[in-house]
Amino acid sequence: MAQRRGSALLLAVPVIALSLFLVGCPKRPATTAASAPPPTGTPSPSAAAPSTAPSPSMTPSPAAPSTAAPSTTPPAPSEFTANANLKDIFFDFDKYDVRPNDAKTLDANAAWLKSNENLVLIEGHCDERGTNEYNLALGERRAKATMNYLVAQGVQASRITIISYGKERPTCTEHSEACWAQNRRAHFLVKAR
Amino acid sequence: MNFFSSLMRPGRPLGVLVALVLLAATVGVVSSPPAARSQGADVLLNVLATGAKKLNIVIPNFAVVAGSDTAGLARSLPQVTAKDLTFSALFSVVSDVPPIPTADPAAVRATFANFAAAGAHAGLQGLLNLRGDRTEVEMRLYDLTSPEFRLIAAKKIDLPATQARRLAHKIADEVVMQFTGESGVADTKIAYVNTGGGSKELSLMDYDGAGATHVTSNKSINLSPMWSPDTRSLAFTSYMRGYPYLYRMFPFENRPVQVVAGFLGINSSPAFSPDGRFLAMTLSRDGNPEVYLLNLATGAFRRLTTYSGIDTEPTWSPTGREIAFVSERAGGAHVFVMDAEGANVRRLTQAGFNTQPRWSPKGDTIVFTSRQGNFDLWAVSPDGSNLRRLTAGPGNNEGASWAPNGRHLVFQSNRPGGYQLFTMLADGSEQQPIPRTPGESTSAAWSPRLP
């Protein structure tokens, strides 16, 4: 290619490309390469060894005699298991008060708990229609309301631990009222003392 | 709110100046010469005064002045910069044209004259110097509206070769700085929660979606990442030890995860104060969810709220003197504001079920999620005025987080089916997806500008 023709082409390319400015049409920038270079810095993997965990006890010392000293941290949730004698209760949308029919379930749960010395973990759950943080708080309120009812029925508070999972552990995932109603629940797990 | 009206905010001399220039233009009177300031701002003002909405900038491929460009950076870096400047919504960009000649002044002039004739207001030249383990770009920004194609600014930026892509972002941020007086947000990251590995793990990506990677792998439930102002750490809630504790991790340093709060009940909703001295959070250790402040230097906790029901989701004003939060004290869920000692509580929202407030780094807006059927993003001024809706579907739109410029937001939307991350401008315009991630992505937190 002759030198002059080459440089004319060199000038023509930007003019053609830039002429879009003149017709008022914003040129889309050429797409960047699809592959992603490595991220800045090296993210450190999550270590399994955090520094000391502060956990002041919220529950009073157990009144019943026990061979072990009162512990300030509850047992890990994984140490608890389901028990067919403790049935779930359910809640209205955005609410954490115990409904009359659910109170009957809790009466039966309380009766069974008073017949043994098991520790119990009450989980509070929400349906998917709340935002994550608010649902953590709402799940906590549901678990707490459930605990308060059981304590009022005579179950020792020191046997009970609560945990909220917000909307993070649904039992069903359909976007339906039926599924949502199932997820708005308090669930019970037990552990031998 | 477009870029032009954003210049008109009270207290911004630039904005007042633009108003004066336009007013003068409208009534046909020549305004008095503006006070001395950067040439870049002059160029932008003059362009906007003609009625244009954006500044036209051409970014030719970079020229390699030293070293061997085996990775094709001369072409790929300006493309990244071009996308960054387009994203800023301030520029119309033309890129992927041959490099500006470096040696022959006549050829340089001719190239600039071509660009100017085609309507470009500015040109960005990059000179690439590849020195083995470091990469350097000298950027030169030219005013193509001036007859002599005046140089606005020249700057050399260099980084380790492994971070070459960041050079493009830093160049874009410098260009925005030259024209507006405030740096762009291209050199930032987004922390978020992703389920692509089968569990909810903390993840990081560049603001444009590049380099997406998990930064936790504990296979439990990890939630609510929030950046410290120095960008060195992320606070987050995790069930990695069974119960929801609040942790702090250091994604760019080889340091173990720290437990920040491990009380009975929930330990969640972290928010660093703008000066980095305090971490606000939600604890239910006193019997119900309340907002607390942790003094990071002394380790002392101080409770701010006292209502017997749910108080949660603190977000700081950039002054550090006020905190907005969510409370059910008025029934339902509403956004309230209190001072940083917990006094002077006032209510901001009236209708809807309102959560996830996020105070803009500019201080002028609080964005929040409102459920009125589906979830959508709304905004309100901190005095409760100017309530407006930012999204109207499709699907649910939640979990907004501000870019450090207070102009852009990232949020999660399930409009594609599952939840993915999107960005938009503060007025709800320019909604666009971040490149898709596996699984679902939620809970985005936009980092401050990286140091």
Image (cartoon, coloured by chain):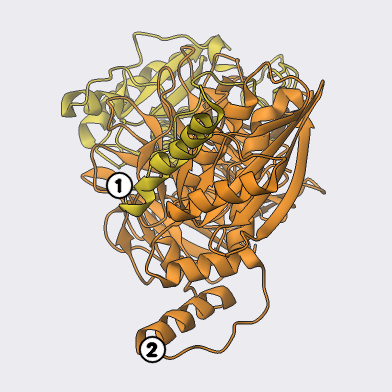
Chain colours: A yellow, B orange
The residue that label 1 is drawn on is B376
Badge 1 crowding class, 10 Å Cα cut-off, few under 14, some 14 to 19, many 20 or more, is many
Q: Is residue B310 above or below residue B15?
A: above
Q: Report helix, strand or loop for mark 2.
A: loop
For the C terminus of chain A, give its image quadrant.
top right
Q: Is residue B366 above or below residue B285?
A: below
Foreground residue, B421 or B351?
A: B421
Foreground residue, B75 or B201?
A: B75
- Image coords of residue B242 (percent x, y): 58, 20
Report whether residue B432 is seen.
yes
Amino acid type assigned to the residue bearing label 2 in the image:
Gly
- Image coords of residue B239 (percent x, y): 56, 23
Which chain letter matches label 2? B
The residue that label 2 is drawn on is B28
Query: Relative to B362, is A91 on the left or the right?
Result: left
Foreground residue, B306 or A192?
A: B306
For marks 2 and 1, the one nearer the N-term is 2
Amino acid type assigned to the residue bearing label 1 in the image:
Asp
Residue B81 location, quadrant = top right
Query: Relative to B284, is B349 on the left or the right?
Result: left
